[in-house]
Each structure stands twice: as C-alpha cells, then as structure tokens.
C-alpha cells in the first residue's frame, strides 16, 4: 500500500483560527465557533474556560486538524485551544486567586525545566521518500531539551502573536503559568495519536490544562492541550 504523508507543522499554520472578540463582533456565529471548538475536548478538560465569550478577548485553536485523514499524516501534533482575556483590576484579582488555589504547579515563563508540547515532524515519509532534519535547529533543540532537562508538568509551547517572546514557554516574562491538571495516558481516538521523539516515555500521550497570568497586563490565557 502506498503511504501518503502530510507535514503537520505546515498544516497547523494554514488551519489555525485566530478569532478576535469585542462587543460588536461577538455574534451567534462566533459564539458557535467557540463552543464547537471546545466541544472537541472532554468536558473535564475545559471546565476552567468561561462558558461564554466575553468582551476584550481573542482565541486560537487547531481543532480543525481533526478533520484531516490521520492515516495519511506523518508527524506529531497536539490539539489545543487557548483563550486570552483582559480584565479589570478587580476582576483579575478575584479570578487569579481562584486559579492559584486550584493549580497543582506554577512556573515562570522562562523556567529552564519546562516540558513543552508542540508539533514536531523532523523526519517525513512522503510518497515513500524519507526527508530528515525537516524541523528547524531551534525545534530540534527544544525536542532534545524535553528529553534531557525538562522536569515540569507538560505545558503547550505558546505561539501567540500578540504575546511572542524568546522564552522557554514562548510567553513574555511577566506571565506566570499555572497547571490546573496534567495526566499521562490516551485521551483521544487512536487515529489522532502519534508518538513523538520529542517527548519522554511517560508523557508520550496525555493532556494538560491551565492558565497563564500577567499581573502587569491583567491578562489571563486559558489553555488546554491533548496529544
């Protein structure tokens, strides 16, 4: 049987949805988009997300990848959604205290022991031809880091345009990352699961959920990732 392969890294760039939310544009279609993307995940994985889209928010997701024929996919990817909200001082303080109480671990944005979850396809099989060293040197370095130095609970590698930074997590240093829950195991259908040489054996598959908080910006990033 001929094997066809797709590079997930490229697919993610094409299929990511970046959706902004403000008082005028939060309409029925946008609310439906938000809800339908969250519904891809087990309800317990998204219990910390707001049920409704508020003002002053934006969110991104790669859940559209689930519509791809995964038998034709080569490489590893995690499914994720994140929601970014800017709060008033009073709202932020109240919500922050709730998450501090409920989190199992917290990390600085540039903690050098972070275990990061990200798409990775260093070796590709396309029409029977093997392509090696497909990933950038930076990605290969992060993969090696995960296997040799990472000791934290897994978190997503944040790739958010409005909060880009050259830290281990990808977030600016004023953010602090709180992991509410993370467990190893298979939480997706087998057709969505691919092993990755970028992860230690214990965390070959699993899920993680949490928030990233910035006291400086009064911004909370809600996130969930499953792989």
Image: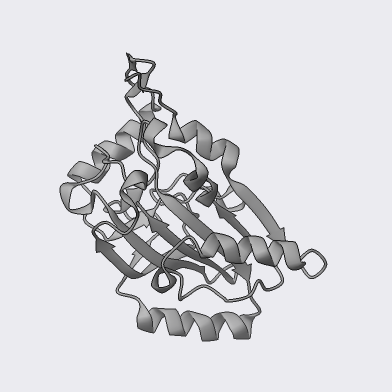
**Direction from residue 82 to residue 149 in the image, left or right:** left
Occupied quadrant, residue 111 = bottom left
* Total numbered labels placed on residues in the image: 0
Occupied quadrant, residue 182 = bottom left
- The residue lying at 44 percent from left, 29 percent from top is 7
Q: Which colour scheme is used?
A: one colour
Estimate the x, y position of residue 80 in percent, counting from the top left: 46, 55
Estimate the x, y position of residue 151 in percent, counting from the top left: 21, 55
Residue that sits furthest to the front in the current view: 1
Q: Relative to the observer, which residue lies in front, 119 or 6?
A: 6
Q: Relative to the observer, which residue lies in front, 44 or 190?
A: 190
| Relative to 42, residue 98 above or below | below
| Relative to 192, residue 153 above or below | below
Residue 57 appears in the picture as rendered: no
- The residue lying at 43 percent from left, 79 percent from top is 99
- The residue lying at 26 percent from left, 64 percent from top is 183
Estimate the x, y position of residue 122 in percent, counting from the top left: 34, 27
Residue 208 appears in the picture as rendered: yes
- The residue lying at 36 percent from left, 57 percent from top is 155
Residue that sits furthest to the top in the current view: 129
**Direction from residue 75 to residue 95 in the image, left or right:** right
The quadrant in which the N terminus is found is top left
Q: Relative to the observer, which residue lies in front, 205 or 120?
A: 205
């Amino acid at each position: 049987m001929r094997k066809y392969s797709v590079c997930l890294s490229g697919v993610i760039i094409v299929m990511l949805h970046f959706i902004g939310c403000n008082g005028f544009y939060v309409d029925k279609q946008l609310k439906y988009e938000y809800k339908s993307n969250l519904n891809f995940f087990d309800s317990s994985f998204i219990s910390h997300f707001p049920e409704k889209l508020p003002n002053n928010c934006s969110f991104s997701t790669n859940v559209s990848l689930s519509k791809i024929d995964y038998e034709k996919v080569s490489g590893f990817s995690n499914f994720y959604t994140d929601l970014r909200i800017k709060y008033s001082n009073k709202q932020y303080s109240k919500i922050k205290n709730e998450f501090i109480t409920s989190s199992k671990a917290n990390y600085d944005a540039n903690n050098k022991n972070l275990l990061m979850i990200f798409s990775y396809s260093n070796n590709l099989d396309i029409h029977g031809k093997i392509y090696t060293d497909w990933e950038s040197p930076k990605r290969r370095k992060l993969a090696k880091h995960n296997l040799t130095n990472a000791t934290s609970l897994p978190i997503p590698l944040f790739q958010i345009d409005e909060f880009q930074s050259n830290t281990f997590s990808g977030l600016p240093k004023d953010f602090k990352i709180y992991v509410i829950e993370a467990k190893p195991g298979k939480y997706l259908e087998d057709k969505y699961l691919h092993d990755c040489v970028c992860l230690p054996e214990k965390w070959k598959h699993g899920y993680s959920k949490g928030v990233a908080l910035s006291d400086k910006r009064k911004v909370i990033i809600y996130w969930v990732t499953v792989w």
